Image (spheres, rainbow, N blue to C red):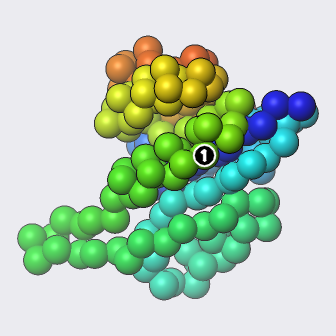
Amino acid sequence: MKKVSIFVDVQNIYYTTKQQFDSNFDYNKFWRFVTHEREVIAAIAYTTNRGDRKQIQFQNILRAIGFEVRLKPFIKRSDGSSKGDWDVGITIDILEYAHQSDIIVLASGDGDFDILIQKIRSLYNVDTEVFGVSSLTANSLKNATTSYFPIDKELLLK
């Protein structure tokens, strides 16, 4: 049985599925797909914490599925923009788990991860699977990974 570690950039997946499909990602279907006949070494979902009831319920759903939920405070800037970026945290964790895993799964379309994916593939000879909304996923990330899986209606809540 292959060992898998799963990392989800929740904000990226939320906003890209909303923008492209006006729908939400189905984390249960995703979990069943990426864990089928695999031993889970780590499963971490990275998100921001606004402290509202709906978000807390969502975080609890992720935990019930099997994810460890990592939270970062939601920061609203004076210019109206917001910050809640987990790129460095995701990178550190993937580097930590890559040598223990046969497969690294990343759910994000963020092109900043292409160098990371290339690095862990060359250092640890690990397979990688990237899930992202196709039109909103960086081509460099698609090209860097062993396998790219476009998020489509099959992985959305109905």
Residue 112: x %, y % from top left? 32, 36
Give the structural element (helix, strand or loop) at label 1: helix
Q: Is residue 51 visible?
A: yes
Residue placed at 57% from the left, 32% from the top? 131
| Residue type at numbered disc 1 | Tyr
Q: Quadrant of the N terminus?
A: top right
Residue 50: x %, y % from top left? 43, 79
Number of disc labels: 1
Location of mark 1 (residue): 97
Query: In the image, is residue 80 above or below residue 53?
Result: above
The quarter of the displayed image where residue 37 is located: top right
Query: In the image, is residue 45 above or below residue 122?
Result: below
Q: Is residue 156 visible?
A: no
Query: In the image, is residue 93 above or below residue 98?
Result: below
The quarter of the displayed image where residue 80 is located: bottom left
Q: Residue furthest left?
A: 79
Residue 125: x %, y % from top left? 59, 21
Query: In the image, is residue 125 above or below residue 28?
Result: above
Residue placed at 61% from the left, 37% from the top? 99
Residue 149: x %, y % from top left? 61, 24
* Camera-side residue of 127 and 149: 127
Circle 1 Cα neighbour tier, 10 Å, few/some/many (<14 / 14–19 / ≥20):
some
The quarter of the displayed image where residue 129 is located: top right
User: Relative to 97, is 141 on the left or the right?
Assistant: left
* Camera-side residue of 150 and 126: 126
Residue placed at 48% from the left, 64% from the top? 47
User: Relative to 107, is 144 on the left or the right?
Assistant: left
* Camera-side residue of 92 and 51: 92
Residue placed at 60% from the left, 46% from the top? 97
